[in-house]
Image (cartoon, helix red, strand yellow):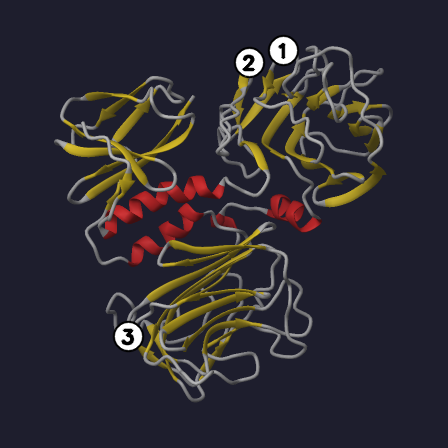
């Protein structure tokens, strides 16, 4: 067995495999995110903090997107989850999705979230349900309480408690319902030192219903950031427009946001297929899309190939959305030459320059914006991240997005554009890698069933069970920053690795062969 503490130079397919796992984990490192319990049949913390919870009863159930076994069902009698954190932070945000089968009456209550114990510093924090003539969702921080009346049974709600140094704020389904001065830190004289889902600190007030995705931050989220959590949808359900550009600008998503061609001619696409992309002459050709792409949370993907990178302070636009009533910031992808061939990207004033581009080479560029971050990706790889705090835009321009020119008809692109996708949600990095992967002309097969890892979480030993199709292939363990820490050959049906020397955290496991790779992760506790 080799033990390597160094950076590895990867082959192309190997890099993609590694980035698939690294990106999944990097996505969870949202600024201030302490714990993320997706509750997909377990209480694992999907952030990098390792604050795993414990299930007491509960059953997997359908989540708010109707996906089976992606949330937890609570029986109202004894089921609950003990989380791995107290959530007792001076500033904090508690975000949780839930659906109640019943709202108890006669002075009773059932608890969605509770953190309350003797050494609590910053006040009892709770979300509960009751009925006093109407179905109520109750929330409390210290003695600052709010009742949201007229809730419905069997309906998913998103509830957020946000606490900063000055204010306690309560949100239902992305909407602020009340604010209180943050001046009360009262709590009980006993109770569990860890937060709970589904019951109180002392094991009363059990909820009958379902809970899905509890996120805990050690800071107060903004309205935009809360909106991004509330409006998040899986990528398959938030596609706004898909322009294949197969000689036309029709929207193939089915949403009807068809674009209009101004000039352009059909050309060969990135796979070598004739008339399956659009060529822009650099003088007057452009496409006016059927949407402005001005969403608080968005992902924009463009494939393009450049014949020339303009110099002398000039630029040419691949994608542009910029106009007077733009709400969420100018969004643009352009090319230029300042001694190097540059691909430039901008959201608001958050700009990034990639300075090693080549002519006549297909690139996929992705801009991802959520409530916290603006992220730029080239060919599936993260280039840079910026805090999403700038929404600058121009005071004029076209109210629809454009391909091949700016909002005012300057900066025309000389080259080709293919396959533009616009989503009203934030892709996680693994989805961005998967979007890029189909464009590779390499013999790469992604297989999820090549290995099984157990136990997971693991403490001292990790067992890797290989499928019969694998013959003496290399398996490696990586840290999330891409350092290979362990590697060996899978010669036996089950290989046991000693991981006792590894620090607590999340690690990546990669099996790489001549035509296959399998990407997995495990938690070291």
In the visual, does 376 lie left or right of 105?
left
Number of marks: 3
Q: Is residue 370 above or below residue 446?
A: below
Q: Earlier in the sequence, mark 2 or mark 3?
A: 2
Q: Nearer the viewer, residue 375 or 467?
A: 375
Question: Where residue 438 sits in the image (x, y, percent)?
Answer: 30, 55
Of helix, strand and loop, which one carries label 3? loop
What residue occupies the far front of the structure in this picture?
A: 5
**In which quarter of the view is residue 328 placed?**
bottom right
Q: CA distance from mark 3 to mark 1?
A: 64 Å
Q: Are dots 1 and 2 in contact, CB under 8 Å?
A: yes
Q: Is residue 403 above or below residue 461?
A: below
- The circle drawn on residue 154 is none
- The circle drawn on residue 57 is 2
Q: Earlier in the sequence, mark 1 or mark 2?
A: 2
Q: Nearer the viewer, residue 352 or 143?
A: 352
**In which quarter of the view is residue 441 placed?**
bottom left
Between label 2 and label 3, give the one nearer the viewer.
3
Question: Where residue 280 sits in the image (x, y, percent)?
Answer: 38, 81
Whether residue 328 can be seen here: yes
Q: CA distance from mark 2 to mark 3?
A: 59 Å
Q: Is residue 508 above or below residue 100?
A: below
Question: Where residue 279 sits in the image (x, y, percent)?
Answer: 35, 79
In the visual, does 383 lie left or right of 440?
right
Of helix, strand and loop, which one carries label 1? loop
Whether residue 243 can be seen here: no
Residue holding disc 3: 360
Residue holding disc 1: 78
Of helix, strand and loop, which one carries label 2? loop
Which residue is at 45% across, 70% downward? 250
């Amino acid at each position: 067995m080799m033990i390597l503490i160094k950076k590895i130079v990867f082959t192309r397919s190997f890099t993609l495999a590694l980035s698939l796992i690294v990106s999944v984990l990097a996505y969870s490192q949202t600024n201030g995110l302490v714990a993320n319990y997706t509750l997909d049949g377990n209480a694992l913390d999907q952030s990098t903090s390792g604050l795993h919870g414990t299930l007491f009863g509960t059953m997997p159930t359908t989540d708010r997107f109707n996906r089976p076994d992606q949330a937890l069902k609570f029986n109202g009698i004894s089921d609950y989850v003990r989380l791995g954190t107290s959530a007792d932070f001076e500033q904090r945000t508690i975000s949780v999705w839930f659906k109640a089968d019943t709202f108890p009456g006669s002075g009773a209550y059932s608890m969605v979230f509770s953190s309350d114990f003797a050494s609590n510093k910053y006040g009892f924090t709770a979300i509960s349900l009751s009925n006093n003539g109407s179905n109520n969702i109750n929330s409390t921080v210290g003695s600052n309480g709010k009742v949201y009346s007229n809730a419905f049974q069997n309906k998913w709600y998103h509830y957020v408690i946000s606490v900063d140094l000055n204010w306690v704020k309560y949100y239902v389904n992305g909407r602020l319902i009340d604010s209180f001065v943050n001046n009360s830190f009262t709590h009980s004289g006993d109770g569990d030192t860890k937060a709970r889902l589904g019951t109180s600190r002392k094991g009363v007030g059990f909820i009958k219903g379902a809970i899905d995705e509890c996120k805990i931050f050690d800071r107060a989220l903004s309205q935009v950031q809360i909106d991004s959590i509330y409006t998040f949808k899986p990528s398959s359900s938030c596609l706004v427009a898909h322009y294949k550009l197969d000689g036309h600008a029709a929207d193939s998503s089915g949403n009807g946001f068809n674009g209009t061609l101004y000039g352009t001619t059909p050309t060969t696409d990135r796979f070598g297929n004739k008339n399956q992309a659009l060529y822009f002459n650099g003088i007057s050709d452009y496409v006016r899309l059927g949407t402005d792409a001005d969403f608080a949370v968005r992902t924009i993907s463009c494939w393009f190939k450049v014949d020339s990178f303009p110099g002398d302070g000039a630029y040419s636009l691949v994608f542009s959305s910029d106009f007077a009533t733009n709400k969420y910031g100018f969004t643009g992808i352009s090319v230029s030459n300042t001694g190097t061939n540059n691909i430039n990207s901008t959201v608001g004033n958050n700009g990034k320059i990639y300075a090693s581009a080549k002519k006549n080479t297909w690139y996929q560029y992705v801009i991802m914006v959520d409530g916290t971050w603006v992220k730029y990706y080239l060919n599936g790889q993260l280039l840079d991240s910026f805090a999403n705090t700038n929404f600058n835009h121009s005071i004029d321009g076209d109210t629809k997005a454009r391909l091949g020119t700016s909002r005012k008809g300057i900066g025309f692109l000389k080259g080709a554009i293919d396959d533009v996708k616009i989503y009203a949600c934030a892709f996680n990095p693994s989805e961005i890698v998967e979007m890029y992967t189909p464009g590779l002309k390499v013999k790469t097969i992604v297989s999820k069933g090549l290995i099984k890892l157990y136990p997971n979480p693991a403490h001292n030993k990790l067992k890797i069970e290989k499928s019969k199709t694998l013959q003496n292939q290399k398996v490696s363990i990586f840290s999330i920053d891409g350092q290979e820490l362990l590697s060996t050959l899978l010669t036996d049906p089950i290989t046991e690795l000693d991981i006792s020397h590894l620090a607590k955290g999340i690690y990546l496991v990669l099996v790489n062969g001549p035509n296959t790779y399998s990407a997995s992760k495990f938690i070291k506790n």
